[in-house]
Image (tube, helix red, strand yellow):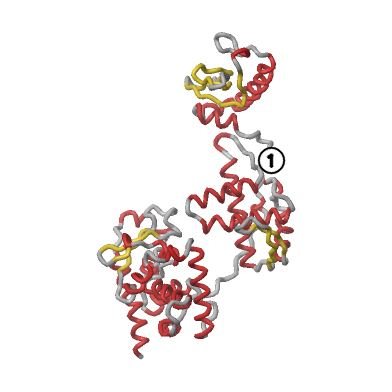
């Protein structure tokens, strides 16, 4: 049986002569203490440090009664808690109190950024801001996100919207946003569902009978299907055009061209991973790195080792350890690359040329032109196949497979240039 009682601890006397009142929780012969905001001076205490002040006792008795009622409600579930877990359960907000999805989203975004998951964090922040715009308030109860609200919210997102945001100097700036396309709406509602699921994980504990978020609107309201993604793979001839494109030395287009080709030569390495590379990543003429997009979701931390071939080497050493001096964040670096690639694309007749095209082109050429198996192409692109996870545990990575894919794709490019 768990018990709770107010106590004053002698060694917790403060410099002003007061004592902080605590609640001592005993459960399974273990003890922990719950802090309170109440303090007592020596005149309010007996010699044995028990409380004699009637006003303090009346306030404390209300708290103690509330905690004892919760203990009675838990009843048979008590065996599932250790004493510290039980203390946390007792001090959680009441099950009927409102959960502010906006406040939760801000903390969730902060946690994601601290985990270096900015790619996930910023879309969630966009969702939180748009919910504030839709409801016209900075506080939104999670019960307001329901299957009745969602269709109207989607209609709202499809229309042109005007809103204010703080800029980096803390000043209000007016913005106009076009209505979302099918693809944009799919991503937005998918991110809202991710936020909602994270809140359920935080506030619900089915094993211990704590269900604060009882509804799930995405059971009835299905996320709109995303349209087929436009193919980003380029032909060998188009890659040749990029190689032979003349740039003004030192301009943004030159940076974009060279990083694009570096990515292509290095088996579709992402711009963020190029940005993060350091001299320590290079060992015995190989570049070893953990793919940032998936390293925290994979047991092998998405490790890959790429041969530093002659085509890639001068490009890599031109930019390694210099990109972070020029760009504060990888996102800024990626934006600069895509702006430069847009200039190149407009000049050589390749619309929508982006960094993604390097990775997609490498993979497509490896499969369609060089006829490598999908498994080998996936290995070279540092993808993971969920159907072979167990098998992968027993197989030591053989980087020579990637070397073969890389050699054949780059050789194909060289042969086309010679014609």
Write the residue at 61% across / 22% down: 39
Instruction: Report if residue 233 is visible in the image.
Output: no
- Judging depth in this view, the residue of 125 and 71 nearest the camera is 125
Quarter of the rendering containing residue 413? bottom left
Where is residue 247 shown, x and y percent of the image?
A: 44, 82
Is residue 4 depicted above or below 223 in this figure? above
Work out which residue is located at the far left of the displayed protein and give it: 284
Q: Is residue 256 left or right of residue 225?
A: left
Is residue 271 depicted above or below 10 in this figure? below
Write the residue at 59% across / 30% down: 91
Where is residue 49 shown, x and y percent of the image?
A: 56, 12
Residue bearing the label numbered 1: 98
Where is residue 231 shown, x and y percent of the image?
A: 52, 75
Work out which residue is located at the far top of the displayed protein and give it: 47
Q: Is residue 331 left or right of residue 182?
A: left
Quarter of the rendering containing residue 359? bottom left
Quarter of the rendering containing residue 314? bottom left
Is residue 257 depicted above or below 416 in this figure? above
Question: Quarter of the image containing the N terminus?
Answer: top right
- Looking at the rendered structure, the number of numbered marks drawn on it comes to 1
């Amino acid at each position: 049986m768990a018990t709770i009682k107010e106590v004053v601890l002698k060694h917790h006397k403060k410099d002003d002569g007061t004592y902080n009142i605590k609640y001592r929780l005993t459960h399974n012969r273990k003890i922990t203490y719950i802090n309170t905001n109440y303090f007592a001076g020596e005149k309010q205490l007996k010699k044995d440090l028990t409380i004699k002040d009637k006003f303090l006792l009346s306030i404390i008795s209300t708290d103690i009664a509330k905690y004892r009622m919760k203990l009675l409600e838990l009843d048979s579930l008590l065996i599932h808690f250790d004493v510290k877990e039980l203390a946390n359960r007792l001090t959680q907000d009441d099950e009927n109190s409102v959960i502010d999805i906006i406040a939760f989203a801000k903390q969730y975004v902060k946690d994601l950024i601290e985990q270096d998951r900015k790619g996930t964090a910023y879309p969630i922040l966009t969702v939180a801001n748009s919910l504030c715009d839709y409801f016209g308030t900075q506080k939104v109860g999670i019960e307001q996100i329901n299957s009745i609200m969602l269709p109207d919210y989607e209609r709202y997102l499809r229309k042109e919207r005007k809103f204010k945001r703080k800029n980096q100097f803390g000043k209000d700036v007016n913005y106009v946003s076009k209505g979302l396309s099918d693809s944009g709406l799919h991503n937005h509602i998918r991110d809202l569902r991710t936020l909602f699921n994270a809140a359920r994980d935080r506030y619900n504990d089915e094993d211990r009978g704590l269900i604060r978020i009882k509804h799930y609107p995405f059971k009835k309201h299905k996320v709109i299907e995303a349209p087929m993604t436009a193919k980003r793979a380029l032909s060998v001839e188009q890659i040749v055009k990029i190689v032979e494109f003349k740039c003004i030395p030192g301009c943004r287009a030159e940076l974009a061209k060279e990083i694009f080709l570096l990515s292509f030569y290095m088996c579709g390495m992402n711009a963020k991973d190029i940005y993060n590379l350091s001299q320590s990543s290079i060992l015995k003429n190989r570049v070893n790195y953990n793919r940032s997009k998936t390293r925290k979701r994979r047991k092998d931390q998405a490790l890959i080792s790429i041969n530093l071939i002659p085509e890639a080497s001068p490009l890599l050493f031109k930019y390694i350890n210099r990109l972070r001096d020029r760009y504060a964040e990888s996102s800024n670096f990626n934006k600069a690359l895509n702006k430069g690639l847009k200039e190149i694309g407009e000049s050589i007749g390749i619309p929508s040329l982006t960094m993604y095209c390097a990775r997609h082109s490498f993979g497509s050429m490896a499969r369609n032109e060089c006829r490598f198996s999908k498994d080998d192409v996936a290995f070279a692109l540092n993808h993971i196949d969920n159907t072979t996870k167990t098998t992968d545990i027993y197989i030591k990575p053989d980087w020579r497979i990637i070397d073969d894919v890389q050699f054949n794709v780059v050789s194909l490019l060289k042969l086309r240039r010679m014609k």
